[in-house]
Image (cartoon, grey):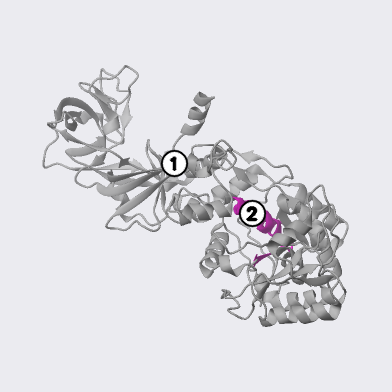
Amino acid sequence: MSDPTSDPVTDPNQKSAPSNFIRQIIDKDLAAGLNDGRVHTRFPPEPNGYLHIGHAKSICLNFGIARDYPGGKCNLRFDDTNPHKENEEFVESIKADVRWLGFDWQDRLYFASDYFEKLYGFAVELIEKGLAYVCDLSAEETREYRGTLKAPGRDSPYRNRSVAENRDLFKRMRAGEFEDGAKVLRARIDMASPNINMRDPTLYRIRHGVVHHQTGAEWCIYPMYDFTHPLSDALEGITHSICTLEFEDHRPFYDWVVAHCSAPYVPRQYEFARLNLQFAVMSKRKLTQLVAEGQVAGWDDPRMPTIAGLRRRGYTPAAIREFCDRIGVSKADNTVEMGMLEACIREDLDRNAPRAMAVMHPLKVVIENYPEDQEEELEASNHPKDPEMGKRKIRFTRELYIDKEDFREQAPNKYKRLVSGGEVRLRNAYVIKAERVIKDNDGEIVELRCSYDPATLGANPEGRKVKGVIHWVSAKYGVRAEVRLYDRLFKHPNPDGDRSVSSFLEHLNPDSLLVLTDSVVESSLAEAKPEQRFQFEREGYFCVDAKDSSPERLVFNRTVTLRDSWAKLEKQLG
């Protein structure tokens, strides 16, 4: 196990986060000389699923504090006390997510299971002090005895067992003599406490037949999170234990555990509001349900709010960090608009994504007055606002593809694309005119016959004004690709909170994924690498799918549209 006091986490390339009430607490502690001037945080995920955007907020908060304070440290600690829901896949995915977001725990990687022997010793210590007892009540009976928010609880009939009997029974629990659920170890505090969390909470339960991903079959009793968490903090010398707001009522028990066990350090817990995001669910149980029922294609489905899903969709670490900075840290629960997250990636990619042309719904164009044996190599800027991104070569040929949406036989005056008898400019190329329309037996347009003006390469036509500009791809050199048009997974802003439906699944968006299997992209994208991001001009921001794309069959995922189309829709709906 690594040393919790090793070198600090720092990253000079990352900016400091905005101040918040947590940082103000730390500033006061430092000014008062508390904690020997140390700042030491931790990020303690449960390895029972993939991390989501809400966890990203906690990661940025905890690791960001370590980064911004001199000598600051942040541990990555897995709360692996519930092994029947945990596995190594989740452990590795969490490590990958934290690294991808730009943070490094260095040599401070821990598991709560690292402390199982010490935690057992602390439990025995509480028994010796008369502060813990073995209880035989069933789970249902325990709930009945606990009482309610308005009524006090009742003492368990096993509450007054002797220290010797409790010590013996707990030892036999560890030895595996009792079945699951037959006995638990409980703290002996106050069954009349107004805080239900202080009414003799469970410290240990029995779990047979589970192979723990770190300790194997060594243990058949496992500590509860509320017992493990404060003692792990104490063992690691954590100065500021930062949790989400639902743990505020658990803080008295946190302090009780630290006060009554001979832990080497006394940490303090602080709470902040968790992230609630519109058009998404954050419950790990519901995310697991989506995966288990096949509503999505795994934890890294680009429609999921998981960090792995956002990464596969094309989000950048910088955009997620920026989002976490913008939403801030407070103690007041609130819901953040999905549009804010989308704005962060849209702004990032607008600055940093090279431009390319892709035709989603190809319509063949034959330029009849362009020589059949002629080709041209044209130049196109990779970014209109960043000359340092350079230029790329695109091939212009007699036969092209434009998008079906960019042609109408008849159209109103405001239509600034190609119409029969009208002209339009091809991006980075010539002005063309639609001369004839070719249809199939069903009356569907299958091809356009056009002419081009050879004097309009980089120049406006003489004596007339052409307003529209459309994108195109050479039919000869274009590369076939699959394009996945992802949208929001839910069509309701609060799918988990709408009580008018029986299940949040009723709010799934049937249009959250549209797969185009016959799109064509420009030849410069043939060598595009997994996760490489582009702006497809006039279409949106896309990235190369990290799992399914190959040189033989490119797959692009839409990250976000060029504009917030949902904002307009929500305004129309009132």
Q: Can you give x and y, in whole percent of width and height, for residue 433 in the image?
A: 21, 26
Q: Amino acid at mark 2?
A: Cys
Q: Amino acid at mark 1?
A: Asp
Which residue in the structure is indicated by mark 1? Answer: 487
> Which residue is at the front of the view, 400 or 295?
295
Image marks 1 and 2: residues in contact by CB distance under 8 Å? no
Whether residue 80 is situated above or below residue 486 in the rendered picture: below
Q: Secondary structure at mark 2?
A: helix
Q: Residues within 10 Å of mark 2 (few under 14, many from 20)?
A: many
Query: Would you say the magenta stretch is mainly helix, strand or loop?
Result: helix
Which residue in the structure is indicated by mark 2? Answer: 60
Q: Secondary structure at mark 1?
A: loop
Q: Can you give x and y, in whole percent of width and height, for residue 334 in the image?
A: 67, 40
Q: Can you give x and y, in whole percent of width and height, for residue 472 in the image?
A: 27, 37
Which of the 4 quarters of the picture holds residue 184? bottom right
Q: Can you give x and y, in whole percent of width and height, for residue 124 in the image?
A: 80, 77
Which of the 4 quarters of the picture holds residue 464? top left
